[in-house]
Amino acid sequence: MSHVAIADQELHLHHPKTFIGKYIWSQDHKVIAIQYSVTAIFVGLIALALSVLMRLQLGFPDQFDFINPNSYLQFVTMHGMIMVIYLLTALLLGGFGNYLIPLMVGTRDMVFPFLNMLSYWFYLLSVVILLASFFAPGGPTGAGWTLYPPQAILEGTPGVGSGIVLMLLSLAVFIVAFTMGGLNYVTTVLQARTRGMTLMRMPLTIWGIFTATILGLFAFPALLVSAIMMLFDTLAGTSFFMPAIVSLGEPLEHEGGSPILFQHLFWFFGHPEVYIVALPAFGMISDVLSVHARKNIFGYRMMVWAIVIIGGLSFIVWAHHMYVSGMNPYFGFFFATTTLIIAVPTAIKVYNWVLTLWRGNIHLTVPMLFAIGFIFTFTHGGLSGLFLGNVVIDLPLSDTFFVVAHFHMVMGVSPIMVLFAAIYHWFPLISGKQLHTGMGKIHFWGTFLGTYAIYLPMHYLGFLGVPRRYYALGDSSFMPDSVHSMNEDITIAAIIVAIFQLVFVFNVIWTLRKGPRSERNPWGAASLEWHTPDVPPDHGNWGDKLPTVYRWAYDYSVPGAKTDFIPQHVPEEDVDYEPGARRSHET
Amino acid sequence: MVIALIILGLVVVTVVFHLLSPWWLTPIASNWQSIDTTIEISFWVTGAVFIAVNVFLAWVVWRYRKHGNNKAHYEPENKSLESWLTIITTVGVVAMLTPGLIAWGKIIHPPEDALIAEAIGQQWQWTYRFPGADGKLGGADARFVSADNPFGLDPEDPEGRDDILVNSQRLHLPVDKPVKVYLRSNDVLHNFAVPQFRVKMDLVPGTETFQWFEPNRVGEYDILCEELCGLAHYTMRGKVVVEEVAQFEQWLAGFPTFEQTQLRLNADLAAGKKLYSNCAVCHGDNGAGNPALNAPNLSILSADYMARQLRYYRDGVRGAHPKDMPGKQMVSMAAIPGGEDSERNLLAYIASLEPVASPRSRASGDPDKGAAVFEVCVACHGAEGQGKGLLSAPRLAGQSDAYLYRQLKYYSQGWRGTHPDDQFGTQMRFMTQTIQNPERLDDLLAYIATLTPQSTASAFASVAKEGQQ
Amino acid sequence: MSFMQIFTDKPWLPEPAGEVPDTDSGRAPGQIAIRMLLGAITILFLLFFVTFIERSQFQDFHALAGEPWQPFTDSMRLWVNTGVLLLASISLHLALRTPQKQRRVMLLMVSGFFAALFVVLQVTVWQFLYHLGYGLAANPANSYFYMLTGVHAAHIVGGLVALLLVSRKLLAGADSEVALRTCATYWHYLFVLWLVLFFMLTRTPETYAKIAAFCGLG
């Protein structure tokens, strides 16, 4: 069975007529993508609010009577969990993955549209269960986003009754949702590419999403295993992770379990998860840089190899989160080495992004600003990772503010910069309107400078040894008063950053309601998604005939060509060259 | 244009911040200089990359920004450039990794002659154990933990008999001698971290972990728990005191062996009753206390708790603050028993008194709101305020609210709980911070006052019984 | 195109006029998706097994077989269940090979019946164990038995739903060849998975020690 046959078969796509059929029970990947995105951004805003509450306590301890040690830990936990899983993973793969894959590889929809729809509804269900835990007796779990047992399921930790159970259930449902979506993304990329779209002609966005999805399909089972086993431990009294324990003066029935086993399972998922977020971000930023610098991505093949190598290596570095966990100390040698090796392909990606700009024709649009900001924040976050990955440096730094600063730079700020770059970049395609540039620039500067003001000093507090997940620091012999005043300043910066996000929300709403229609392809992008018959693309994407691809997605500023970009679906003989400049196959 | 300048500016700001930061590694107090060296090497390598990449980025953005008719260069890849960058990066990585792995090799191999110690973590306090004359720690497990054996030592293991139990959050160590600290937890994960020593390691229930270091600077350092261990994680503090060997040995000699703690001596209630007549003046014949005389209700307290308080009064741990007037009074009274035996008799007698609940003396406060404030007290003092012997948490239900009011105020003002030897002072001081204001304090006391009913009679009995032992 | 060729292709070179590279992998989407899904499920169970083998080396682990009085020293019940699941697999395989629609639907129903019967029989095994005093939380070996067979049964139930959907499609006359083939792949996989589970859960302590030593988990 060939792809052509599939493509032609799919002309009888299910075209619903009613509003509900079109926008609620939709099987159109674009509608599903928007559903995913709106839900993810909604929970993301909740997580943002939680981070502000948490920062209020750290900056101004004991000034707010609605924050006690219990609720503080709940804010910390839910902020982390929502941001990592329910915002970043869902928005990058469920949102952008869904929207861009079929358009960028030139197909009409995902190969299993019904499954795709189901994926969103399961995701929504997981979000509902998650949010329900806020209203459960005892509130949501406050075990930290890592949910380490035994503490996660014992008294003394907030949300121990229903909070943790709802959290684990929600994760299990999320994993089901992800698997349904993930099978779709992988199969669509492997099977439904249009004529001429070889793997090496795919935009890096697709490479990133594709690799991340495979990572997700093979890493999320580890989280599911740990969630199921912990559910048994807490609901049925089994002892998978629970040794003999005297909990707050009460001896428990458990015996013989191993808490470290959970940590291995968790991080076997948790580390690839970092790359599930990072790889799509790497891909999208590559495309944004290339389009707005009017230059092909530098070292495309190296970029693809780096994505694949990073994806592979990400499965053998997990225990670098566990250097001080009490695991076999000899593991330290292996995991420190693999961790620092992964820095090499990652560094190459950074070099190639900068080299893409080098000798380019840089249009300083809003997406480009976010992309440049990303290079800066990612470089910073990546380099601080070299400290933590090197096992001996992790000893003084683990569980301090340094760790918090590091992973927020590399996995918070950086992917968010990419997400904003991507939203500003693809908004005209999705909505037919271009976000307001002035507001976009205000949003960029507030976010970029504000987040750096938050996290740069935090690294140094970490060097001093300020511990993370502390409700209050109190007095100590090694923390000067300046630590407390810095904490205040960081909180103020965090509030300012949060306010700047409202500019973005306003910009989106204003643009959708009042913004002028944009051009079809305002940035002059060569990749396929901008060349649908209608913008925004209609259901089925390509009208009567699927496009045929004749080149890679990066033919910008081709020597001798009259335009500064050649779309992917334009055959070589149709390209308008200066006299005598036509390229021959041999060059 | 602006962005190029800003990127350049941020590089400058970062470097200047790094050089001028008032926050930096604490002055090292152990042999792990090699960790600091690795950090330094990493800073040189990563700093160079950070500056090079971002300055180049700023220059590129400025130089190749869109202006006039410039056109981008067309260059799909440049193999030799990419290869060179890969090689240079690899060299940098090796330069950081090598000293790290060498140091790690030392960190995981403690010397044979190291002094042995054990740190025990429990929600949310530290205690310690040293081997006795045999130089070996006896077996221990959470399954052995009981009111008589809070350290959970294996009673059958002869090697444990002479182990020295340090029931204090202060750990003394001799200077310039390598120490291997075994780490054990009876409940959840904890982490033993002293910033000045650089190394840290988790305590994992069900198994024993270790770390080793050689303290090389005399002084007093904070011990922090750095693995989230529940709501009062942040209060789990201890101190390590590094001192000369002679002082250390003197300190250690002041603690009992496991065998000594297991001696069960009988108490003479009649003699205790006689001694109690001194106390009855203020605390009343039935031990119910008297708010007018600032005397708390003793009838509900356990003998262990009272013994600790008497010791604190005598040692200047409690009642030493000039503003603590009732405490001052108790300091002189605490000498009355005048000996271990008579104190045991006295406390056994008080514990045998029928528990009586004190009446309310304060009118204000909303118990419903107080329940929310009480949320953080539950873990140790129990949902019914019944207290928990194993956690050394006294009973609150039935206690005089005037007394509780005064003590919570003293804690929050630092009149109680600031002495370094007060095992629970830090924790209680942190916890009273969460009350935040007088209204919430009133609400809290109003709530605790609702916890007196008979439903907790059995708890009364068990606490009282515990005290009699 | 070989693997190496795919990754070393220089995509920026213009291609000769009129040539469009072939991008067909020659596989049906269902077949690709099911392989990915089975990969994920394999990892799921592999991780369960790793924790199981690790946990089996703890003092408090009492294997379910070995001594004469232990429930699976004689595992006849489980062999019967294995037979039932094998019948489910065989009937689905026959359904795939039958061109006739009515027979096909009937064989699918038979297959579904045996699969459902298997789940019911597994539940009776749980009851059998429970009445012998082998409660869920009494010992990690018991916990693993209930949990792993439970997770396996949940996958069977998922397969039953898929089977029903395929049957409906078949009855409606739509082209269901690929869907049926996908279903069969999944079905056979679950049978093999059950054999592995069966083997893993009913070994003696000595065998577990050997496996653990072999995997370096001992």
Image: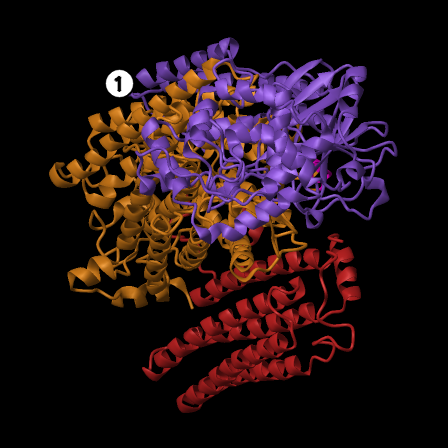
Chain colours: A orange, B purple, C red
Is residue A302 rendered to the left or right of residue A92?
right
Above or below, A84 against A437 in this view is below
Is residue B68 rendered to the left or right of residue B36?
left
Name the residue located 39 percent from the left edge and 81 percent from the top edge.
Answer: C167
In the picture, residue A312 is in which quadrant?
top right
Name the residue that disc number 1 marks: B68
Q: Nearer the viewer, residue B417 or A22?
A: B417
Above or below, C63 against A127 in this view is below
Q: Chain of mark 1?
A: B
Residue B216 painted magenta: no
Residue C160, image x, y percentages = 45, 76
Name the residue located 42 percent from the left edge and 68 percent from the top edge.
Answer: A1
User: Which stretch did the figure color magenta?
Assistant: A328-333
Which residue is situated farthest in the right direction here? B134
Above or below, B39 against A246 in this view is above
Q: Nearer the viewer, residue B334 or C217?
A: B334
Residue B289, image x, y percentages = 49, 33
Is residue C20 rendered to the left or right of residue A232?
left
- Mark 1: which secondary structure? loop
Q: Nearer the viewer, residue A334 or C76?
A: C76
Residue A204, image x, y percentages = 42, 41
Q: Quadrant of the C terminus of chain B?
A: top right
Query: How many marks can you see?
Result: 1
Residue B421, image x, y percentages = 62, 23
Residue A331 painted magenta: yes
Q: Nearer the viewer, residue A287 or B253?
A: B253
